Amino acid sequence: MASINTGIEWTDKTWNPTTGCDKVSPGCTHCYAEALVRRFPTNFPNGFALTLHPERLQDPLRWRKPSRIFVNSMSDLFHSEVPVSFLKEVFETIGKTPWHVYQILTKRHERLLELAQSLDWPDNLWMGVSVENQNYVSRIDYLRQVPAKVRFLSCEPLLGSLQLDLTGIHWVIVGGESGQKHRPMNLEWAQSIRDQCQEAGVAFFFKQVGGRTPKAGGRLLDGNIWDEMPSLWHLHIQRWENGNVKLISKLG
Ligand code: SF4
C-alpha cells in the first residue's frame, strides 16, 4: 500500500516509504502495523521486517490536494535499519511539497536526536514522539532539541498517568487503546493531560476513549470533542487551501 486515506482523526492520509519495525516499548505490544501485516500477508512479502520502498519516495509530488500526511503508519522512520541517505530523501520530498503537512512519529528518540543536526528540517515537517507512560517522558527531552517547526506528542495508547514538561511542545494527542486485548485507559489520565495542555497553552487533541473497536468508547471527554490543532496548521490552511493551485502546479 503506497498510501491510503485514513480513519485516523488527526491526519488525512498515510505515506509509507518504509514498512516493518521491531517492538521497543509497552506502547508497541498490540502494534497496529504488525496486526495489519498479519491480516494482509500478500501485501507485505517481507512480513514485518524493515523494508525500504524507494519507489514510493516521489508519491506526494503527485498528490495535489493539500493534506496532512502521516509518514510511516506501518513503520518507524528512525529505525536503525533506515539508512541516513534514505531519510534525507524522505526529507527532500517533504521540502519539495510545501502544500502538505507531514507528521512523523517515532519511538526512536535517541536516533532522532543523533541525526537531527545532519537533516534539513522543512517548515512543513511536524515531528513527534510517543509517550505511553511516565517511564517514557524522557523522549520529550530529546524531541525538544529537534529543530522542527511543530513538535508533538502522541500519548496513545495511554497506559498510565503522565506529568509532562510541555516546554517547546506545540501539540498533544491522547487516545486509549482499542482491540480485543486493549488495556483500558482511565479517563482521569486524559483529563489531567488536557488540563496540563491548557495550563501550558498547548493544543490538545483527544482521539478516542478506546475499547474493543476504535469507535467503541467514542471521542468525548467531559462531554466535549477536543480537536485542537497547532496554530501553524491554521496558517498553513490559509496559505494553501484558499486556491493556491497555481502555486502548487509551479512547485510540483
Ligand atoms: S515503533 Fe510503532 S510501528 Fe514499530 S513496533 Fe512499535 S508501535 Fe509498531
Image (cartoon, grey):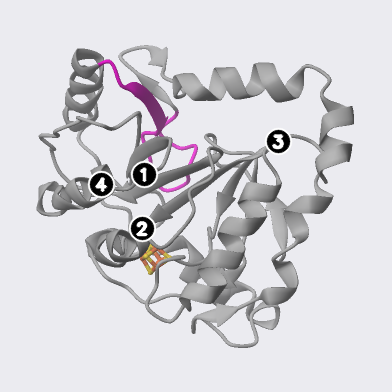
| Dot 2: element | helix
Q: CA distance from mark 2 to mark 3?
A: 23 Å
Residue occupied by mark 2: 116
**Nearest to the observer: residue 151 or residue 120:** 120
Mark 2 or 3, which is nearer the eye? Answer: 2
Residue occupied by mark 3: 99
Drawn side of residue 134 relative to residue 250, left or right: left
Residue occupied by mark 4: 145
Where residue 169 appears, as percent x and y from the top left, is: 29, 32
State which tag comes first along the sequence, 4 or 3.
3
Dominant SS of magenta comes to loop
Residue occupied by mark 1: 147
Q: CA distance from mark 4 to mark 2?
A: 8 Å
Where residue 172 appears, as percent x and y from the top left, is: 33, 32
Where residue 81 appears, as percent x and y from the top left, is: 43, 82
Q: Quadrant of residue 45?
A: bottom right
- Ligand 1 resides in the quarter of the picture at bottom left
**Quadrant placement of the N terminus:** bottom right
Q: Mark 3 and mark 4 in contact (Cβ < 8 Å)?
A: no
The residue depicted at 23 percent of the width and 29 percent of the height is: 187
Q: Quadrant of residue 218?
A: top left
Q: Quadrant of residue 205?
A: top left
